[in-house]
Image: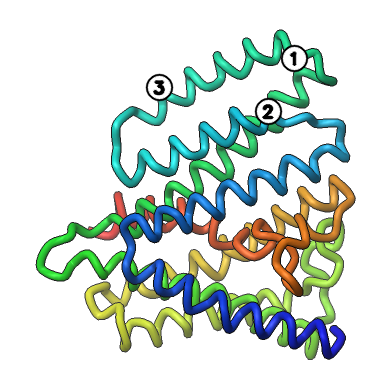
Amino acid sequence: MSMSNGITRLLVALLGIPLILAACYFGKIYFLIFCLGIALLSFYEFSQFVKNKGIKVNIWLGYAAIILLVSNRYAPFFDNFNFLILFVVVISLIELFRNNGSAIYNLGGTLLGVLYLGLFASSLVGIREFYPAVDGLYYRGGYIIISVFISIWMCDSAAYYGGTALGKHKLFPRVSPKKSWEGAIFGFVFSIIAMVIARFLILDFLSWSSIIILGVIIGIIGQLGDLIESLFKRDAVVKDSSNIIPGHGGIFDRFDSLLYTAPVIFLYLMYINR
């Protein structure tokens, strides 16, 4: 990494991180807009790099579906399952008349983008809105999201530096040649450490078992999310999802672990953390 690139990355982080944390803390429409931004920009990046595979995503219908899925988690007004059935019917009919390359590829790419980015981003909103806006409970969702962010950042940093210093055994060379098992273990351990620290600072309303489980989820599922996005990019022969963030690549690059982790954490909160 060059000195100028490192400075650019630092400046972007110094400007962006406070805004992200503020959106997480205050929630409501601010966090909804943040999640919509992640989902829509990531979907755009996805639609662009899959063109290398001959896939012509139905981008405008995809945008509409993602907006509805994410917004519906904030203010529910339809059943997601029924909506997705209708969505498949509609995009199939539209593809009948598009005559733009492979219909199977186009339908598959559009569905993957909408399901992966729309549903996963809606899970982020679900986590933030999990606690009711009474008696100060509403901020708990923000504290969880902030803690998850910090845990992912620590996981990524520990995996990078631990892998650079000690990495000898390749983790998944077909997908990400530079990642090592040693780095992954460092990331896993530090994701749990981050959640333990968060328990003392802002997550005292969660049990210790939940803290450890969330750390494990982030340490495993978060790193798998990074590998899966790398799989998409390697298949499409691109290095970054885009260059929209100076020094950091694309939105999908920056939030891949968060997006992949979100539904697992949301399901844990919904059905297990009682």
Q: Earlier in the sequence, mark 2 or mark 1?
A: 2
* Residue holding disc 1: 98
Label 3, label 2: how far apart the Cα atoms are: 20 Å
**Secondary structure state at the residue bearing disc 2:** loop
**Secondary structure state at the residue bearing disc 1:** helix
Depicted 234 relative to depicted 96: above or below: below
Depicted 168 relative to depicted 88: above or below: below
The reply to whether discs 3 and 1 touch (Cβ–Cβ < 8 Å) is no
**Secondary structure state at the residue bearing disc 3:** helix
Hey, what amino acid is under mark 1?
Arg
Q: Which mark is residue 110?
A: none
Q: Which mark is residue 82?
A: 3
Hey, what amino acid is under mark 3?
Asn
Residue name at image x 84 percent, y 72 percent: 178
Residue name at image x 49 percent, y 72 percent: 149
113 on left or right of 129:
right
Observer-side mark, 3 or 1, equals: 1
Quadrant (top left, top right, bottom left, bottom right) of the C terminus:
bottom left
Q: Classify residue 145 by image quadrant.
A: bottom left
Q: Classify residue 5 by image quadrant.
A: bottom right
Depicted 18 relative to depicted 263: above or below: below
Observer-side mark, 3 or 2, equals: 2
The reply to whether discs 2 and 1 touch (Cβ–Cβ < 8 Å) is yes
Residue name at image x 61 percent, y 19 percent: 91
Please tell me how crowded label 2 is: few (under 14), some (14-19), or many (20+) other residues with Cα within 10 Å.
Answer: some
Residue 124 location in percent, x, y?
A: 43, 55
Q: Earlier in the sequence, mark 3 or mark 1?
A: 3
* Residue holding disc 2: 58
